[in-house]
Image: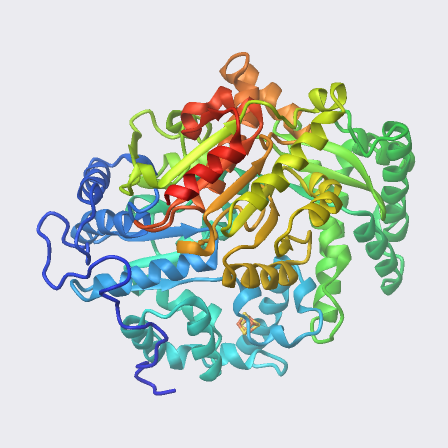
Amino acid sequence: MPLDGSVSSWKPIEKSNGPSVVTEVNSEAPYLPYKPRETQIQIITDIRNALDKGRHIVIESGTGTGKTITSLAGSLEHAKARGKKIIYITRTISQSDQVMKELRAISTLKPVSGITLTGRNKSCPLLQARPDFDQLSPTALSTLCSDRKQKNQQGHSGGCPYFEKVPHMVDIVESYCKKSFPKSDEIDAYCKGMNVCPYEIKKVMMKDFDIIVAPYIHIIDPDIRDNFLTALNVEPKDFVLIVDEAHNLMDAVREQESFSITSRLMGSANDECSAFNHPEVYDGITLDTFVKTVRNCVRELGTKYIGFNMKEALLEPKALEKSICSALGIAETSLGAITERLLELGEKREEAIADTDAPSSPLLEFATLLKAWVNSPNDRYVKSIKVSEDGEFLSASCIDPVDICKFLNSLSGAVHMSGTLQPLDTYAKVLGLPMTSIPRTYPSPFPKENKSVIYSKDVTTNFQELQKNPAMKANLQRMVAQLCNSVDKNILVFMPSYRVMKEMRPYLEENIYKNLYWEEAGRQKKTMASLDEFRRGRSGVFVCVMGGSVAEGMDFPGDELCFAVIVGMPYPPPSLEIKAMKDMFDAKYGPGMGWRLTSEIPAVRKIRQAIGRLIRTETDRGMAVILDNRAARNARQLEAVPSEDPVADAVRFFAKH
Ligand code: SF4
């Protein structure tokens, strides 16, 4: 590969496919490299004005409005004039790559630079060679990497050869990135070819780029964020944040802050104690005794709390702590010192095994999580005991993240964007955005008549209805089969859960007379292979689960998808976490808001995401049928009309299109 970085997989910017490229700067939107579509100038102007005033702008913008390019064009106008950086956070690598593609298009008009970051788990060329690489947690990767780097810095053997070359290669890699706008896998491959660590070199270079495209974790994890902003050498006032697919932000934060202490982890930590010579952790209590006691206490709590036919139970505040301390005859205040000692021993063990192929220390992970458990406040975490086939385990689910709200409030302007963000005021309220935040909705510029959404008045997946009326399930699956057999197009069927999908599978396999493909739980490769085959055909049926990887974030342009059958309103199943969040929101925002925020709004968003798969270009045409009469309650947001006979309506729609 030439050192000037002239290699890139980007194809020349097409004039016939997608937006029309311009060669002259548009004075209304100087960073827009395409002929503006309807509403694009408005979106760009609104973003620029909001940022100029130091405000957050919360945007729902329909398919075809060009969310990526408009957010970039508006933010660049503001940021470039003030010497600010832009941090663009995304959920998926394909979206990061899309940002790089748009930056490259912008660079044909105006000087701009951008770089896309990924985690060590995607880009570390050294540790990728380990057989257990896929099982290593981010913490373990970080510890292993730190050990190697320390050896480099101290001039000891066993360091990282890719790290060693970082200082010598910065100029070359930077020049490649500024010239070629590489996608994430391209920059990783380029660096690997140069024997330099992509992860570390990006950390050194990124302060010299205008736009840093990064996974959500760089902002939602407080420790990673601190390191990231320090390496970038910026304060919150020095950059603009763009949040892509903002409707996912709060769930991503909750997920990030939630954790489990599994039965398997406790078992491995217990086994690892044999590598030590019975060190004391507190007042005559040895490491082995302590770890064994925690394990026994978890089992006892399982027996006490989890009833017959149950899989989980809420723990009383401090139930675990009280149980451990009572078993060991110590005061609760001693637990802090014990967890610190456990961490110290875990770190020593991690250092000792760093040069071996042994997986990272389970004791260290156990100590880290136990400390987090003891320190997690009960009003923001649902602490429960659950049981899986491996045994009882502890779960701490964050229901009220506060750190991200404080951080967002400290920014002087941000762009929150999604195709499905309504109600915008609720999004802003839950994230605690400033009262001055600006809500904006921009409709899709594509012809309305190209899309039709109907719902059946006769069926539902409501649990009580299904119990009361045993014929309901038969009616539902019959309707799915009839709809699939009546429309000679590629069809996606969205099931409310894997359980329902499994129940209906035998009937659908027997009664749908087309090629059938299935999303397979936990088997991503197989699912993707089936999906590829489905896309290549023109009259197949792909059955997937609402909210899964197919339902969100995948594009099916043209005839790859024309018809969506949505089985049931995808309200989340009851759980301890949903119940606790519902109670919390009722108390915060008034009665009824809990159900709206935890069930109704997410269900409507999921359906809108699914419907959004149908129309991806100006000429796409598509129809969605919702098989649940409860859609009537949200008909306006879903842009859906009732249907007496969905099969006849579908046949009529496709006869016209
Ligand atoms: Fe991996 Fe880079 Fe760390 Fe070396 S310095 S271990 S290549 S992440």
Q: On the picture, is 579 further left or further right than 65?
A: right
- Residue at the top extreme? 591
Left or right of 381? Residue 537 is left
- Is residue 403 in view? no
Where is the C terminus found, in terms of image quarters? top left
The structure residue drawn at horizontal position 35% and vertical position 46%, both measured from the top left corner, is 242
Q: In the figure, residue 204 lies in which quadrant?
A: bottom left
Which x, y percent locates residue 434?
35, 28
Residue 37 visible in the current orientation: yes
Q: Residue visible at 33% across and 51% down?
A: 617
Measuring from the top left, give residue 287's x and y in whole percent.
Answer: 85, 52
Residue 191, quarter of picture: bottom left
| Residue 202: % across, % down | 41, 67
Residue under the image location 18 percent in, 64 percent down: 111
Quarter where residue 622 is shown: top left
Q: Which is more toward the observer, 457 or 251?
A: 457
**Closer to us: 97 or 152:** 97
